[in-house]
Amino acid sequence: MDHRTFGETEDCKGCRFWSEMIAKCDGGGPVLAMCLNSKSKFSAEYKSGSGKCAAWASGEFGAVDEPGFDASVYEDAPAERHLSAVNVVQQAK
């Protein structure tokens, strides 16, 4: 099952940049969520939870686009990184 693992797995399910708000499920298949990391080779692409890349960042506090998200909870990811994720979403529209 593809559900957020909050950093417990080193794949998209555990990454803070696997979107909480932009996702789809085609034909009952796996959940595909958009990668919001502008530094990932999968930036602005829909990926399954089992995807992996070198730009993975632990999502122990949830996704960067989660409603009410406070970027300061990720000490190693300043607000600029969150804004980069927002820019990826805007470019994908």
Image: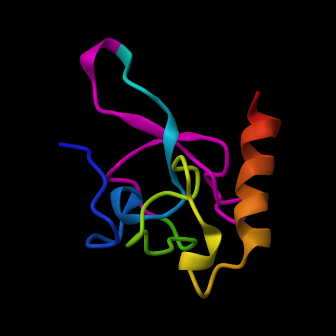
Measuring 54% from the left and 77% from the top, which residue is drawn there? 73
Q: Quadrant of residue 5?
A: bottom left
Q: Main secondary structure of the magenta part?
A: loop
Q: Quadrant of residue 45?
A: top right
Q: Is residue 23 left or right of residue 82?
A: left
Quadrant for the C terminus in the image? top right
The vertical placement of 39 against 26, above or below, is below
The image position of residue 12, as x and y in percent, is: 41, 57
Please say which color scheme the image uses: rainbow
Whether 48 is among the magenta residues is yes
The image position of residue 29, as x and y in percent, is: 27, 24
Measuring 43% from the left and 68% from the top, which residue is drawn there? 59
Q: Quadrant of residue 70?
A: bottom right
The image position of residue 53, as x and y in percent, is: 50, 66
Q: Magenta span covers which residues?
A: 27-52
Quadrant for the N terminus in the image? top left
Whether 43 is among the magenta residues is yes
Measuring 50% from the left and 71% from the top, which residue is drawn there? 56
Q: Is residue 83 left or right of residue 14?
A: right
Q: Is residue 8 left or right of residue 26?
A: left
Q: Is residue 46 left or right of residue 44?
A: left
Q: Residue extending furthest left?
A: 1
The vertical placement of 47 against 72, above or below, is above
The vertical placement of 76 against 41, above or below, is below
The vertical placement of 92 against 39, above or below, is above
Total of numbered circles in the picture?
Answer: 0
Q: Residue extending furthest bottom?
A: 76
The image position of residue 57, as x and y in percent, is: 50, 74
